[in-house]
């Protein structure tokens, strides 16, 4: 069972009950009008998912259960939606006397066809720079010298004002890049673009100019911006 997608309301109530006490008996977890066999069924499901454990007559949250139950909004009794956290790598090099940046065209949804920089999600337990180096190598075939430049909080909305994406990016600048360049990979294409030609790219992400400014600064910076996107 994947608890993130298949959590039953009764299981939610059990997890929230155990969130506020170190352990509980079957009778303490049973609510009015809930048949015993129904509660037993869902307790077994939680045990199989390793979200709870049983010792004698008491049920407890496991370590996994504590982490999962802590995601709930205890008033709404639902998993609280949170912003995604990832990295953004802006690679730069000198070529024939001009400064070039490595752009990536997305060939997957959402934002199919848009141009931006290399991005990727931070994995559970992974260090931030490890993520940046891993994603950069996997998607471009390159390594280099990495410099942390700051954090961007990017919020995208449609024209009706509905939020489409809410993301935090740890932004890195990559220089002295080397390796066997990958021009295409599943889900995208990579291309080096001279600074004067950046504005000519079609479907350019609206934060590109601000990210370029961020990696040019000597000091760390933080950006927090809202954008309206007509395509998603």
Image (spheres, rainbow, N blue to C red):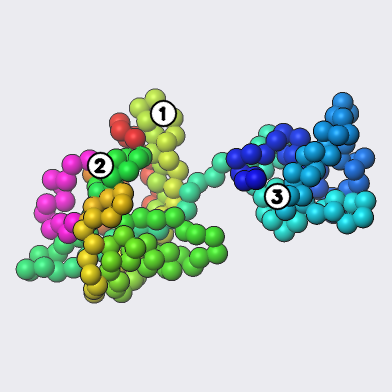
Q: Which residue is mark 1?
A: 161
Q: From the viewer's perspective, is 193 left or right of 185? A: left
Tell me which segment is drawn in magenta.
191-203
Estimate how packed mark 3 is, as few (under 14), some (14 to 19) or many (20 or more) residues with alpha carbons within 10 Å: some
Image quarter of residue 166: top left
Image quarter of residue 164: top left
Labels 3, 2: front one: 3
- Looking at the rendered structure, which numbered label has been put on residue 49? 3
| Residue 218 image position (x, y, % from top left) | 30, 68
- Looking at the rendered structure, which numbered label has been put on residue 113? 2
| Element type where label 2 sits in the image | loop
| Residue 106 image position (x, y, % from top left) | 28, 47
Q: From the viewer's perspective, is 141 left or right of 157? A: left
Let me know if residue 85 appears in the view.
yes
Estimate how packed mark 1 is, as few (under 14), some (14 to 19) or many (20 or more) residues with alpha carbons within 10 Å: few
Q: Is residue 196 magenta?
A: yes
| Element type where label 3 sits in the image | loop
Labels 2, 1: front one: 2
Pointer 3 and pointer 2: residues touching (CB < 8 Å)? Answer: no
Labels 3, 1: front one: 3
Q: From the viewer's perspective, is 36 left or right of 3? A: right
| Residue 117 image position (x, y, % from top left) | 29, 54
Mark 3 or mark 1, earlier in chain: 3
């Amino acid at each position: 069972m994947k608890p993130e997608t298949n959590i039953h309301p009764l299981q939610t109530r059990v997890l929230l009950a155990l969130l506020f006490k170190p352990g509980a008996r079957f009778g303490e977890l049973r609510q009015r009008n809930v048949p015993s066999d129904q509660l037993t069924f869902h307790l077994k499901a939680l045990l199989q998912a390793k979200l709870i454990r049983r010792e004698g007559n008491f049920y407890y949250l496991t370590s996994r259960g504590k982490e999962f139950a802590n995601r709930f909004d205890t008033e709404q009794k639902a998993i609280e939606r949170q912003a995604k956290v990832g990295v953004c790598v802006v690679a730069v090099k000198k070529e024939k006397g001009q400064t070039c940046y490595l752009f990536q065209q997305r060939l997957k949804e959402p934002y199919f066809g848009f141009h931006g920089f290399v991005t990727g999600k931070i994995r559970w337990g992974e260090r931030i720079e490890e993520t940046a180096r891993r994603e950069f190598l996997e998607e471009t075939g390159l390594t280099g010298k990495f410099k942390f430049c700051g954090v961007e909080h990017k919020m995208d909305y449609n024209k009706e004002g509905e939020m489409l994406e809410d993301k935090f990016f740890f932004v890195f600048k990559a220089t002295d890049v080397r390796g066997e360049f990958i021009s295409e990979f599943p889900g995208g294409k990579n291309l080096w673009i001279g600074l004067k030609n950046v504005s000519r790219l079609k479907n350019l992400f609206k934060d590109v100019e601000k990210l370029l400014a961020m990696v040019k600064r000597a000091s760390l910076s933080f950006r927090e911006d809202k954008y309206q996107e007509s395509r998603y």
